[in-house]
Image: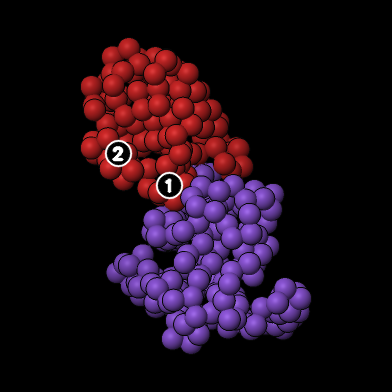
Amino acid sequence: MMIYIGGAGHGQAALCEKETGRAPAPCTPETALTAPAIADFHLLIRAVLRAGGDGPAFARALLAQNPDAVLVCDEIGGGIVPLDPFERRWREETGRALETLAAAPGTRLVRVWYGIGEALQ
Amino acid sequence: MLIFISGGSASGKSALAERACMALDAPQHIYIATMPVCSDEDRRKVARHHALRAGRGFSGTLEMPGRLDAAAVPPDAAVLLECLSTFTANRMFSGEASDDWLEALWGELLPLIDRPGPTVIVSADVGADGAAYDAVTEDYRRVLTGLGVRLCARADAAVEAVCGRALVHKGALPMI
């Protein structure tokens, strides 16, 4: 597993494609289990929640069924915690999913700031 | 020579950028101010900023509250552009239309950063709150952050301001 994460628009998808040769594509919770490169992981978690799932369980399914995937995600936890319960849960579950993925053996994590990638592990 | 400095609101990026600019070896140090002046309150604010910078050794201030005019900037001067977020807002919300603000504003920045003299550009990080805004605001975020990505690709130093300290992502600041 490999994760490229940064603020919205910081070029994480472009850096992923440049470094891995794989262009991230938007996925459904089903297609993500076989996709080589997953775009907008934060939006994917929204779809997972809407379908009744949760972040860590989905992350475990990804690790089990698609362990060689690369995924790209926006950082979404840097603002005021929203009043809307679903918006709150989305931030929470996205963070927990990412923590689950990053804690798995062999996961590489790259933080992207204005196109500059920094490997955290 | 290009230095890019960004960070959250009130992260100390301006002070860091002013110190970086003054540490650059150049015959003069010019500050490009981007805030539009619309009221007496603005005029007082600008006068205060001028007084504050006077003590830091800047040779002069160029007021550019609209289009960036690189031709008005001495070619060999060290320049501090403060800030990219105000410049982008000034241009995108001036009433003028553009099919592609990212390309249009990049085209205005290039002559400034291609001068022989060094350039320091301050921006603002606005992309990590998970919020979905209206289309106009989302476009502003996309353009502002996209300009930052392009500037960082060319920058000799790219630095995130945290509590007035420099978290260096690329290269090194001249004073550290």
In x, y percent, where is residue A6? 45, 41
Residue farthest toward the top in the current orientation of the protein: A64
Of mark 2 and mark 1, the one earlier in the sequence is 2
Q: Is residue B113 above or below residue B153?
A: below
Q: Are marks 2 and 1 on the same chain?
A: yes
Identify the residue at horizontal 55%, vertical 37% (top origin): A77
Which chain's colour is purple?
B
Residue A19, numbered label:
2
Residue ID at (39%, 30%): A3
Q: Secondary structure at mark 2?
A: helix
Task: Tell me the element at label 1.
Answer: strand
In the picture, measured across the screen, residue A28 lies left or right of residue B65, that is left
Name the kind of residue labelled 2 in the image.
Answer: Glu
The residue identified by callout 1 is: A116
Q: Position of residue A32 (x, y in %)?
A: 28, 25
Whether residue B135 is visible here, answered yes or no, is no
Q: Chain of mark 1?
A: A
Q: CA distance from mark 2 to mark 1?
A: 12 Å
Kindly identify the residue that appears in the image at 36 percent across and 35 percent down. Answer: A72
**Residue at point 42%, 42% (across, down):** A117
Please state which of residues B98 and B120 is positioned toward the viewer in this rendering: B120
Q: Which amino acid lies under the numbered mark 1 shown in the image of this protein?
A: Ile
